Structure formats: structure tokens, C-alpha cells
Image (cartoon, rainbow, N blue to C red):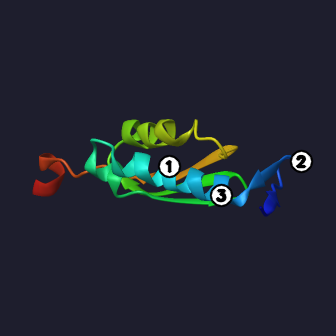
Amino acid sequence: MTALQTSHSKTLISIPVVATALRQARQRLLSNCYSEIRELCATLREGELTINGVVRSFYLKQIAQTIVRDIQGVEKVTNNVSVVYPQTTREQSQ
């Protein structure tokens, strides 16, 4: 089995654990009840899981981070999710 050393620690993480961690993160995002969270992307590099995409509230951004934070093989979560508020009816009429 090949091992991969992370830049943040001296521990070795096996490649199957990395693949499993990424698969688990993507599955958790895809199985969420919020459609915006299901559309987010996840990547994993050297123990750092990065989530990207767009949601309509900081609440959903936090939910996304929370559902992937406790996955074995993930040492750090970087939340690059952008929050874009939907236009209100008042703003649309101006």
C-alpha cells in the first residue's frame, strides 16, 4: 500500500483512506436535503478538503462545512463557498 505524507503533519495517510474520504464528503453533500448543497464540489489534497460553489445564505455555507468536517482522513476543511443573496421583490422592481 502506498502512503502519502501530509504537509500539515508527520502522519502518513494511505491513498485508499484519501479516496474514501473524498467519496464520503461528496456523498454527504449529494445526500443533503438542500439542493444548493447538493450542487457543491469537493476536492481533497494532502488532508485538506476544499468545498466550492454558491449558496444563498451563510447558514447553508455553514451547513456544508459542518457535514464534511468529521470525516476520517480530513485534517482541515477550507470553505470556499460563496454566498450570493437572491434579489428581493423590492430590488427587482427598481
Residue 94 visible, this angle: no
Most extreme residue toward the bottom, as rendered? 2
User: Residue 10 got which mark?
Assistant: 2
Mark 2 lies on a secondary structure that is loop
Mark 1 lies on a secondary structure that is helix
**Are circles 1 and 3 on residues that touch, CB within 8 Å?**
no
The amino acid pointed to by label 2 is Lys
Q: Judge by depth and name the residue closer to the eye, 50 or 59.
A: 50
Q: What is the spatial separation of the Cα atoms under label 3 and label 2, in whole angstroms?
A: 18 Å
Which label's residue is closer to the chain start, 1 or 3?
Answer: 3
Q: Residue at x 65, y 57 (%)?
A: 16
Which label's residue is closer to the chain start, 3 or 2?
Answer: 2
Residue 4 to residue 11: above or below: below
Q: 89 left or right of 2?
A: left
Residue 55: percent from left, percent from top: 35, 51
The amino acid pointed to by label 1 is Gln
Residue 32: percent from left, percent from top: 33, 43
User: Residue 16 got which mark?
Assistant: 3
Residue 76 to residue 59: above or below: below
> Dot 3 surroundings within 10 Å: few (below 14), some, or many (20 or more)?
few
Q: Residue at x 35, y 52 (%)?
A: 30
The amino acid pointed to by label 3 is Pro
Q: Residue at x 60, y 59 (%)?
A: 19
Residue 39: percent from left, percent from top: 34, 58
User: Residue 46 got which mark?
Assistant: none
Q: Judge by depth and name the residue closer to the eye, 5 or 85.
A: 5
Mark 3 lies on a secondary structure that is helix
Q: Quadrant of residue 34?
A: top left
User: Residue 24 got which mark?
Assistant: 1
